[in-house]
Amino acid sequence: MTALLDMDRLLDDLEAGLRRILEERGVTAPALIGIRTGGVWLADVMSKRLALKEPWGELDISFYRDDFSRIGLNPKVKPSSLPFSTEDRDIILIDDVIMSGRTIRAAMNEIFDYGRPASIILATLVDLGARELPVQPDVTGQVLALESHQRVKLRGPDPLYIELQETGR
């Protein structure tokens, strides 16, 4: 599994995919937003790789989760920070792992509370499938099929690496 998750290759693939889609869509000045925590680390890296001039934003989607009333509040909640207007902007929304699509739905709900973007490009480092909602990334570093007892976790921020975790069967 480790050989499949070469971080340099994943980041290269993510960057190349973002450059391709930005060019295809004619987007020249995107606003980049990372979903805390792993997405924020990736936003930092991709902002530098894409040579974006504007600071990137951070979302903490804790209050926007649809399971908030069931699981409670994460004790490490921090306020979101978007140092730009989202109104009529082309947004790159980036997260480390996509599985059910629920985190992305929550992030989009929060973005729309700040303003209506012109478009949202979704980029994820790892796609685990298993969607519960019809949300698909535009750009993915790697698609993985895991066993039910396996999880992946992005660790970082320096160095960034993917950890494969075994849970109880």
Image (cartoon, helix red, strand yellow):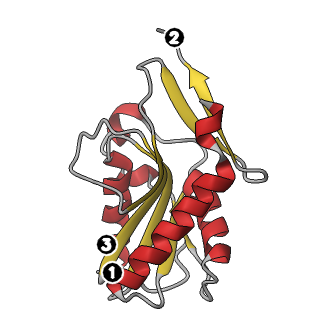
Q: Nearer the viewer, residue 106 or 134?
A: 134
**Dots 1 and 3: beta carbons under 8 Å?**
yes
Separation of residues labelled 1 and 3 (CA atoms)? 5 Å
Answer left or right for 161 relative to 33: right
Amino acid type shown at disc 3: Phe
Residue ranking furthest to the top = 169
Q: Nearer the viewer, residue 127 or 5?
A: 5
Of tags 2 and 3, the one toward the viewer is 2
Quarter of the N terminus within the rendering: top right
Answer left or right for 1 relative to 28: right
Q: Earlier in the sequence, mark 2 or mark 1?
A: 1
Separation of residues labelled 2 and 1 (CA atoms)? 42 Å
- Would residue 107 be visible to someone looking at this image? yes
The residue labelled by disc 2 is 168
Disc 1 secondary structure class:
loop
Q: Residue at x 49, y 55 (%)?
A: 95
Separation of residues labelled 2 and 3 (CA atoms)? 38 Å
